[in-house]
Structures are given as structure tokens and as C-alpha cells.
Amino acid sequence: DVEECTCPTSSSPGRSVTPNSIFPCPSLSSDYPKELQFLTNPCEKCFCPAPPPKISDLMNDKDLLDLLRLKLDPNHCTIKNWKNFASRWGMSYDELTLLEHRTQGSLSHSPTQEFLLRYNQKTVTELTELCRIYQRIDVLRLLQSWIEKDWPSRWQHTQSI
């Protein structure tokens, strides 16, 4: 018997996996039909890696978002910030000015957060490229650490819900 891999991140959709790569779910009794005795998460069947995270995924991590705000919100004449990133991705001068004015002095709204919300379908890898371009190694390291350490477990958690 061969079961189809239904993992949405599989590099070859519909690729077959052998039954040996499927593990019985220990929490189900043997009274359940055979098909239901296996874990239902396709990525536990085929061990597909987590897909590249999008900015919308990191927006769910409040701690990371707070750190990004601390690093990218401040205005320094020699340090590139959210404005440079947003401009690079196509925000006009008028949009930047409006966003800056709208978030100025607000504790609940951050220009970095607003910028990230606007581009939330871009990948975190694209954001790391901006960090490289603007030599924001501090932000780059923060994002790389999140991608390597936090993202896989966060993604697995969303798959099991």
C-alpha cells in the first residue's frame, strides 16, 4: 500500500510515500478504522520541511514584532530604518510621510508594523534581503534566528490545530 503525500509544501505534489513513513497515532484505540489510526497531519506523514515564512507569519509573534519595532522605528540620520525598506518596496514619498505622521507619538501604532502589514504577503527572506542591502545586520540576525529556531515549531503548531 502506498499513500499519497498531501502536504501543501511538498516539492512534488502527489508524490508517494511508503507506509513505513506513516506513524500510528498512539492516542487512538484500535477500535477506530485503520485509516483513522494514523496521524492526520500530512507533514507528520512525510516530514516535509516548513515552507518559507511570510511576513504575515512573523506578525503573529509579538516578541519578534516588538524587537523589530525597537530596531526599525527610530529615526537616525546614519542608520537605515523602516522608511528605507518601505521605499525600496515601492512606497512613495507621500505614503511614507502620511504613515510617519499617522503613527507619530502613538504607542499602539508603529510605522514598522504598518509597513510590514502592507507587505505581509512578501516572504521573510525578502525582508532579510533588505537587511543585507541596508546593512542592518542586527535585524538580519534577528530574522535568521527566528526562521531557524522559532518558525518551524510555530508552523508545526498551526498544522496541528
Image: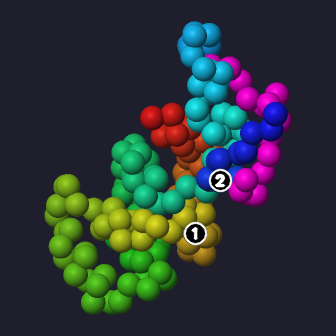
Apparent side of residue 139 relative to residue 129 in the rendered image (left or right): left
Residue 42 position, x and y percent, is 63, 39
Element assignment for label 1: helix
- Secondary element type, mark 2: loop
Please, what is the three-letter code of the amino acid marked with disc 2? Thr
Q: What's the residue at 19%, 76% (across, down)? A: 101
The colouring scheme, among rainbow, by chain, secondary structure or one colour, is rainbow
Q: What's the residue at 55%, 55% (across, down)?
A: 53
Task: From the viewer's perspective, tell me whether residue 131 is left or right of residue 2.
Answer: left
Where residue 142 appears, x then y in whole percent?
55, 51
Considering only vertical position in the picture, is 160 above or below 135? above
On residue 126, the disc is 1
Q: Is residue 139 left or right of residue 81?
A: right
Report whether residue 24 is seen.
yes
Of 157 and 61, nearer the camera is 157
Decide: is 37 above or below 82. above
The span shown in magenta is 11-25
Q: Residues within 10 Å of mark 2 (few under 14, many from 20)?
A: some
* Label 1–label 2 contact, CB within 8 A: no
Identify the residue under disc 2.
9
Q: Measured from the top left, where is residue 48 in percent x and y?
A: 70, 44
As displayed, is residue 147 above or below residue 33? below
Q: Distance of mark 1 from mark 2, alpha carbons?
A: 19 Å
Identity of the amino acid at label 1?
Answer: Glu
